[in-house]
Image: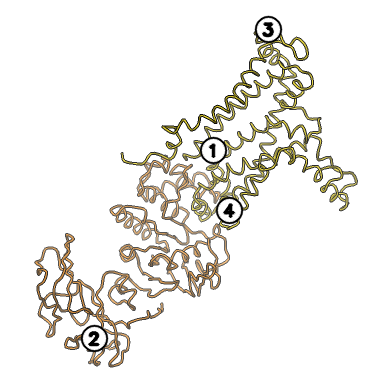
Chain colours: A yellow, B orange
């Protein structure tokens, strides 16, 4: 066969592979080594603040899985992640469909607007919500002025605030994934469906949605993993009242100096997120081939 | 009643006028082809009938009812696309059943009509396959079955054969025509291929710049084109610049017979019969003769003397390219089994008066129904 190699083949390092070395070196130094260090810490028992025993043990993991409190933490974090994922998916679908189908010259600008939240520091982004969602914020000012309610709504420093913050932060990931998938669905398929008598909404559910499914699964897994491992947004938007795995780890390590427990929960979160990411990548690939 | 009528329809895309005050009637059960080069507005017309585009002016009638403002899902049209547009996530049977399921018909009826439509295109055996497992020709037959199973008021075919190779194209052309005649579906067919247009249609509308130049039966279109563009676009033809000498008594009452002379060499002159238009003496015009109507013979009292300068053999025929002078050259088609003169040879060529068509040179005459 004289066909040119697929585009992906060019990404496989051949004789240019050594160009990756500097980046790999940095990653090894600042990412892999600390990770191994953290992993080792989870294998020692804590003997008091900032100290741990010398001998290796799996005791920390056994303790985690035998205590219902930790199962609750894992379950609760995952439930929050699922809720955020659903909210993100529902808000991203119409937007992605629009971005995939629009012929507007403004499309690049609209895409830039979608990516904009990613360009702002996570702390700034969350603080930015305060004048909007706070008790004296813009939304409540509107609500009180219009007389729709006499008391301000609690929109921040609680679960709702965390969800709003996470959906906002993760929307770009979902939108970009879905837009790419929907763009690959030929518009003639929708025209065929409509000409056969299906209304636009029926066409969306019968044709677009099934064909976008690989992207929906990939985007959802991505958003889910990012939301269960998020620390800053739950910490800032939850006002310290919302405990998820990431904030729990921070508490153990920084406040209680229980490195062993913090490391154990970190490793469990790491495994859980990695597993989901691998599945997400799989689906992403399937979507691209379809 | 499922006649389709476009009445004074105009469609603009920004400044560009894609369809310009066009009127067209497709009679019930008739297959009408819109034939034109890309950008002639033929697909725009089709998409206005389908409801994907709304005309800026004029009306679209389907089955006598004004459908101009009707959304596509209420028009009951069956459409076949160039790139098949089969639903990749559904099986062949599910694809065909799609329009029936959307109409919420009882399951039993859906199943029966689906199998009936599949047997119409001889694909019952492949009903459980996915579109990706089918060849191009099979895909387009599924698309055809999917379009006709809903018993559409009008069948819309948007260059359905263009993605197929030559041999399949012929087969599918026959298949579409057979299904269309069997079900007697009013059909609008869009193509840029004049062979397809002539071979399949009851009537053909030749389009250019958003207008219809000529709308008639294939035979008439071919034998009596009404302008240079149609003569050139439909089939191969020879044009000779001539000047009108005089009018001579006609053989038919509603047509005239003219005596014309070659503009560049008035020593050569011919009679042209069956001319429906009126020309003035001394008027310059184009004489159009199909290459298969030209004979290499001395039969005519005044044959054109030409020199052969190129021979092309295509199996069933020879193309003999000859020149009289710089301004006058003709191509002659000779059956492949016959002997042909050799290059450089001087030969006489002639044709019968009824085989010539006189056309006004320059601007194309806009057409009537």
Q: Is residue B32 visible?
A: no
Name the N-terminal-most of marks 4 and 1: 4
Q: Does residue B102 appear left or right of residue A161 in this picture?
A: left
Quote the CA–CA distance across marks 4 and 3: 69 Å
Nearer-the-camera pick, B146 or A265: A265
Quote the CA–CA distance across marks 4 and 1: 24 Å
Q: Is residue B112 visible?
A: yes
SS class, disc 2: loop
Q: Which residue occupies 67% across, 44% down? A: A91
Disc number at residue A199? 4
User: Which image quadrant: the N terminus of chain A?
Assistant: top left
Q: Chain of mark 1?
A: A
Disc number at residue B263? 2
Q: Does residue A39 appear left or right of residue B368 in this picture?
A: right
SS class, disc 1: helix
Compared with B74, A51 (above or below) is above
In the picture of the structure, the residue carrying the numbered disc 3 is A54
Q: Nearer the viewer, mark 2 or mark 1?
A: 2
Q: Nearer the viewer, mark 3 or mark 1?
A: 3
Quote the CA–CA distance across marks 2 and 3: 112 Å
């Amino acid at each position: 066969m004289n066909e040119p190699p697929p585009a992906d083949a060019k990404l496989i390092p051949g004789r240019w592979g050594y160009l990756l070395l500097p980046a790999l070196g940095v990653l090894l130094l600042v990412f892999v080594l600390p990770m191994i260090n953290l992993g080792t810490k989870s294998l020692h028992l804590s003997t008091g603040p900032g100290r741990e025993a010398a001998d290796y043990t799996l005791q920390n993991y056994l303790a985690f899985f035998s205590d219902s409190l930790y199962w609750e933490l894992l379950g609760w974090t995952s439930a929050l992640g699922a809720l955020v994922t659903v909210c993100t998916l529902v808000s991203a679908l119409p937007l992605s469909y629009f971005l995939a189908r629009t012929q507007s010259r403004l499309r690049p600008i609209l895409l830039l607007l979608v990516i904009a939240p990613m360009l702002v520091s996570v702390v700034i982004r969350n603080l930015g919500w305060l004048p909007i969602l706070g008790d004296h914020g813009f939304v409540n000012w509107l609500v009180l002025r219009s007389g729709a309610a006499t008391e301000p709504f609690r929109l921040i420093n609680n679960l709702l605030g965390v969800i709003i913050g996470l959906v906002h932060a993760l929307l770009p990931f979902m939108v970009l994934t879905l837009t790419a998938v929907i763009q690959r669905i030929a518009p003639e398929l929708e025209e065929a469906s409509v000409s056969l008598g299906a209304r636009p909404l029926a066409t969306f559910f019968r044709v677009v949605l099934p064909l976008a499914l690989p992207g929906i699964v990939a985007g959802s897994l991505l958003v889910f993993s990012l939301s269960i491992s998020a620390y800053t947004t739950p910490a800032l938007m939850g006002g310290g009242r919302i405990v998820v795995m990431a904030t729990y780890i921070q508490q153990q390590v920084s406040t209680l100096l229980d490195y062993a427990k913090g490391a154990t929960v970190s490793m469990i979160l790491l495994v859980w997120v990695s597993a989901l990411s691998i599945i997400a990548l799989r689906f992403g690939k399937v979507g691209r081939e379809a | 009643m499922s006649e389709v009528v476009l009445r004074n329809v105009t469609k603009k895309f920004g400044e560009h006028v894609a369809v310009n005050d066009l009127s067209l009637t497709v009679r019930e059960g008739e297959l009408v082809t819109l034939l034109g080069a890309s950008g002639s507005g033929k697909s725009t017309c089709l998409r206005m009938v389908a409801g994907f585009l709304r005309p800026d002016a004029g009306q679209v009638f389907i089955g006598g009812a004004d459908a101009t403002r009707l959304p596509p899902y209420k028009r009951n049209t069956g459409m076949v696309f160039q790139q098949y547009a089969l639903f990749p996530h559904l099986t062949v049977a599910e694809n065909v059943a799609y329009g029936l399921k959307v109409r919420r018909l009882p399951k039993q009826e859906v199943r029966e009509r689906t199998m009936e439509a599949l047997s119409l295109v001889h694909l019952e055996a492949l009903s459980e396959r996915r579109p990706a497992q089918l060849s191009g020709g099979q895909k387009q037959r599924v698309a055809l079955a999917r379009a006709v199973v809903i018993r559409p008021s009008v069948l819309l075919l948007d260059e359905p054969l263009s993605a197929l190779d030559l041999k399949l194209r012929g087969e599918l052309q026959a298949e579409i025509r057979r299904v269309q005649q069997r079900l007697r579906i009013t059909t609008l067919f869009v193509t840029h291929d004049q062979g397809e247009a002539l071979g399949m249609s009851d009537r053909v509308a030749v389009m250019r710049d958003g207008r219809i130049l000529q709308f008639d039966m294939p035979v008439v279109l071919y034998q009596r084109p009404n302008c240079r563009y149609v003569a050139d676009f439909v089939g191969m033809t020879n044009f000779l610049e001539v000047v009108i000498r005089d009018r001579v008594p006609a053989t038919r009452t509603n047509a005239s017979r003219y005596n014309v002379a070659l503009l560049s060499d008035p020593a050569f002159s011919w009679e042209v019969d069956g001319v429906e238009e009126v020309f003035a003496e001394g008027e310059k015009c184009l004489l159009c003769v199909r290459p298969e109507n030209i004979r290499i013979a001395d039969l005519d009292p005044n044959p054109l003397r030409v020199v052969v300068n190129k021979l092309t053999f295509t199996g069933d025929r020879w193309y003999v390219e000859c020149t009289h002078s710089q301004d006058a050259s003709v191509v002659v088609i000779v059956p492949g089994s016959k002997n042909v003169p050799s290059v450089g040879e001087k030969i006489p060529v002639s044709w019968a008066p009824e085989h010539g068509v006189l056309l006004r040179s320059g601007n194309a005459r806009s057409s009537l129904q």
